[in-house]
Image (cartoon, rainbow, N blue to C red):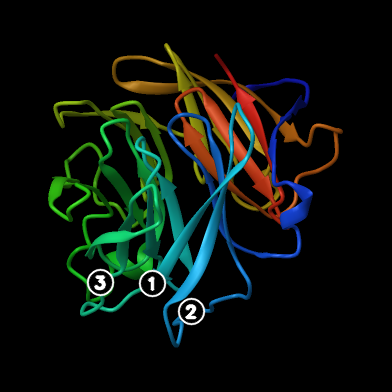
Amino acid sequence: MPTKRPETRLMPYARLPRRYHDRHIAHSTVDAYGRAHWLLTEHDPGGVPAHPYDAVVVTVGDGVPYETHLSAVLAGFPRLEALADDGFVLAAARSRTHEQQVQVFDPLGRCGVTFRVGDAIEHLLADESGALWVGYFDEGIYGDDELSRPGLRRWSLSGEPLWTYRRTRDAGEISDCYALNVHRRTVWACPYQRFPVLEIGRDGGMRVRQNSVQGAKGFVVHADRLVFFGGYGADHDRLVDCRLTEQTVEALTEGRLSRPDGGALGRRRVVSRGPRLYIQEEPGLEWTVLDIS
């Protein structure tokens, strides 16, 4: 069993400027370059918008926050991701097989490409090459959309499938992509049921490490260190510090993660990028960070 360790506090990272606080936050993310983005609308577009709508993305990085206005957005329950050229990708988390659920916007907010990646998107993260990594949850994997069934896929920005998870004896099938970490051009995943740690390299080769930590919703990696965050029930704020070997993930110490002020974490979403774990609690105005590098 891992030994216990003291509480770890998050650090403040990025905050939505106050002048936007009256807008609806449709989604938010932190990209491969550490920039935080908020997708804002006048009203909640809902699950299936009746008409295309306009939105604005507010980006907070090293300089002055700036806006990108997007026109003719189609996505209900949108997932937002930013690209290196200052463009954006929006995808509807839920979709039917006849719907073009992904839109690629250029830096001027114009949509140039639409395509499908499958129903039930849990994670949408771009790597530094601009390719999209999509992890799916169980309703897509066990639904009627063949695109979602593998559980984890890589797509080009034109909708071409570049990599698809295939079941192995060591890893089994993916029933839900619980945690995904995209850093530069290396990708790590920890899926349900067996919770193996998958490392996918630039060439598409995959290494499987056996792991005993269950239910984590995010994790970070630096050198031979891996730290899991989250778990079931009372373990929702758990941190498990681990060592990577050639074939296993060895749990060493266990603790808790808290807000910068020491308070308990509430409902939140997580983005994992290499050694950085970004956390955004409701109502979504601020990102905090744990950096193990």
96 shown above or below 110: below
**Would you say the residues marked 1 and 2 are in contact, meaning their CB atoms lie under 8 Å apart?**
yes
Amino acid carrying label 3: it is Gln
Instruction: Single out the mark in the foreground, 3 or 1.
Output: 3
Horizontal side of 222 relative to 203 (left or right) equals: right
Q: Which numbered disc, 3 or 1, marks the residue that appears first in the sequence? A: 1
SS state under label 1: loop
Are there few (<14), some (14-19), or many (20+) residues within 10 Å of tag 3?
some
Tell me residue 8's x, y (percent).
74, 25
Would you name the residue on which mark 3 appears? Answer: 100
Would you name the residue on which mark 1 appears? Answer: 94
Amino acid carrying label 1: it is Arg
Tell me residue 236's x, y (percent).
66, 46
Query: Is residue 216 at least partly visible in the picture?
Result: no
Q: Residue at x 64, y 31 (%)?
A: 289
Horizontal side of 259 relative to 39 (left or right) equals: right
Q: Residue at x 42, y 12 (%)?
A: 224
SS state under label 2: loop
Report the Cα–Cα distance between label 3 and label 1: 11 Å
Amino acid carrying label 2: it is Gly
Would you name the residue on which mark 2 appears? Answer: 47
**In front: 45, or 244?**
45
Q: Quadrant of the C terminus?
A: top right
Tell me residue 272's x, y (percent).
49, 36
Report the Cα–Cα distance between label 3 and label 2: 15 Å
Horizontal side of 140 relative to 216 (left or right) equals: left
Q: Residue at x 28, y 54 (%)?
A: 151
